[in-house]
């Protein structure tokens, strides 16, 4: 991976947006044009502040209600598979959230059945959650970190009567099982590290199964509630950023291209990238979303389109292979994607197809923005070459909707993620703000801000700075 960086504004504060300095080299003209998207932010920020604050307040109210749905009891009878009450022809009826943590189980919305059916899967242990993750019952890195934490908490509850040594072994094995169920998702690894750190910090209380179960349950709930607050802040920053693009607004609706699952189904609550789009739309901004179908699971066609339709946001589906051509023909103003993991230098992993879009966006001076909650930061990955990128089963590409589409004996290569270098990114949206290059110090500052705000580390484990191990 190259470590080339764009020229930064004069004396920038890490993690902040500031006006871009005029280019003095002719070869910088194209890059400067690409960064026009941000140029008006400083002068327009005060005009949009009131709108953003109002939008953030509304989102907090929504998030608070969603927290009750996530953490509170449900009237639905417990069942291994329960179909929610949806009116005929209206599969959105009865939808509350992508998952719910209940006293003795976690209930997952089966994303494989959308958009035609709303079906809930009940998991009673961490092993059940790991199986659901492997089988793509739920998808989306931020969501997976939360449900993995719930799974380990369920295992702790089920092992109350085990001896301390056996309980320790069970928790360690279950944490590894959950990590391996989603190897590319940094939030899962971070959640497991945090849960086990909370367990270790219990000291002598580790001998008491009830204390362990209560502590890990508390930690899982903290991870969920911090995600709610963090996504709230990320969305407010993203809405302000998009609202500052007056040039795009002058042409009419802001045309936003997405790929992969980036809404509440991937974030667990309001979502990340799709929630930014929704916040702009709800604030009166004209937006039009171009949704890449996202093979092989058709996450865009099935999930993102479903969420946009429910929100009343205008959209149109785009074949994955046609998206780059739309960029080249000037049919897109900005590309927004979610991430699986972020390396210390700003390289990212995200949905397959994202790298090609980032390259074409760079070629045609179109901003390529990523939404990355702090939970997606991988403290151990120096750059994109160290990020996890295990392939998924090739069989996923050989069929569509349960029907085989390739000849017998065909083999398929099925990358799980693309690695996109930091030099192709226009900004990384986080809870701490819209980060600009150079990303290494900006990401370190964002992590420290998360720790200071209480969104990193458990009550017993204490805050940590995942970037402190190197420069």
Image (cartoon, rainbow, N blue to C red):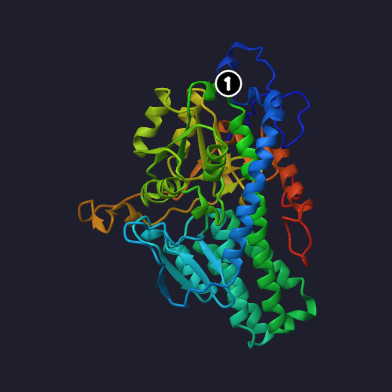
Total count of labels: 1
Is residue 41 depicted above or below 283 in this figure?
A: above
The x, y position of residue 288, in whole percent, is 45, 34
333 horizontally vs 467: left or right: left
Residue with the most extreme left position: 407
Which residue position is annotated with label 1? 31
The x, y position of residue 199, in whole percent, is 71, 72
The x, y position of residue 69, in whole percent, is 57, 64
Which residue is at 43% across, 47% downward?
304
The x, y position of residue 172, in whole percent, is 62, 73
Residue 411 visible in the shown view: yes
Quarter of the image containing the C terminus? top right
Which residue is at 64% across, 88% downward?
161
Which residue is at 56% across, 23% downward?
34
168 horizontally vs 403: left or right: right
Residue 393 occupies which quadrant of the picture?
Answer: bottom left
Is residue 466 depicted above or below 80 in this figure?
A: above
């Amino acid at each position: 991976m190259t470590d080339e960086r764009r020229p930064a504004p004069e004396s920038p504060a890490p993690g902040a947006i500031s006006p871009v300095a005029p280019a003095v080299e002719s070869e910088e003209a194209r890059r400067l044009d690409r960064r026009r998207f941000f140029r008006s932010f400083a002068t327009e920020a005060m005009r949009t502040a009131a709108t953003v604050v109002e939008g953030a307040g509304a989102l907090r109210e929504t998030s608070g209600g969603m927290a009750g749905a996530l953490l509170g009891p449900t009237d639905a009878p417990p069942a291994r598979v329960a179909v929610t009450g949806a009116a005929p022809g209206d599969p959105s009826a009865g939808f509350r959230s992508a998952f719910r943590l209940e006293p003795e189980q976690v209930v997952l919305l089966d994303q494989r059945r959308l958009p035609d059916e709303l079906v809930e899967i009940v998991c009673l242990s961490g092993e059940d959650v790991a199986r659901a993750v492997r089988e793509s019952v739920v998808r989306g890195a931020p969501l997976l970190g939360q449900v993995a934490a719930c799974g380990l908490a369920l295992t702790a509850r089920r092992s109350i009567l085990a001896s301390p040594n056996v309980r320790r072994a069970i928790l360690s094995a279950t944490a590894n099982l959950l990590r391996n169920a989603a190897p590319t998702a940094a939030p899962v690894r971070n959640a497991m590290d945090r849960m086990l750190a909370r367990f270790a910090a219990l000291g002598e209380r580790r001998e008491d199964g009830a204390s362990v179960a209560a502590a890990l349950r508390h930690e899982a709930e903290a991870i969920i509630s911090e995600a709610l607050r963090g996504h709230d802040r990320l969305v407010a920053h993203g809405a302000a950023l998009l609202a500052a693009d007056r040039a795009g607004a002058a042409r009419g609706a802001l045309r936003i291209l997405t790929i992969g699952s980036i809404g509440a189904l991937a974030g667990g609550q309001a979502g990340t990238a799709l929630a930014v789009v929704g916040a702009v739309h709800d604030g009166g901004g004209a937006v039009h979303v171009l949704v890449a179908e996202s093979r092989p699971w058709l996450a865009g066609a099935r999930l993102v389109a479903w969420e946009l339709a429910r929100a009343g946001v205008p959209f149109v589906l785009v074949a994955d292979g046609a998206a780059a051509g739309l960029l080249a023909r000037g049919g897109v103003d900005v590309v927004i994607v979610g991430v699986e993991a972020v390396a210390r230098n700003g390289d990212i992993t995200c949905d397959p197809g994202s790298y090609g879009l980032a390259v074409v966006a760079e070629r045609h001076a179109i901003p390529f923005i990523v939404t990355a909650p702090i939970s997606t930061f991988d403290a151990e990955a120096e750059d994109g070459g160290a990020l996890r990128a295990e392939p998924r089963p090739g069989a996923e590409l050989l069929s569509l909707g349960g029907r085989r589409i390739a000849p017998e004996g065909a083999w398929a290569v099925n990358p799980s993620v693309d690695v996109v270098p930091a030099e192709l990114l226009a900004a990384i949206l986080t809870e701490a703000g819209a980060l600009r290059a150079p990303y290494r110090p900006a990401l370190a500052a964002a992590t420290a801000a998360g720790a200071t705000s209480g969104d990193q580390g458990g009550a017993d484990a204490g805050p940590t700075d995942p970037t402190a191990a190197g420069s």
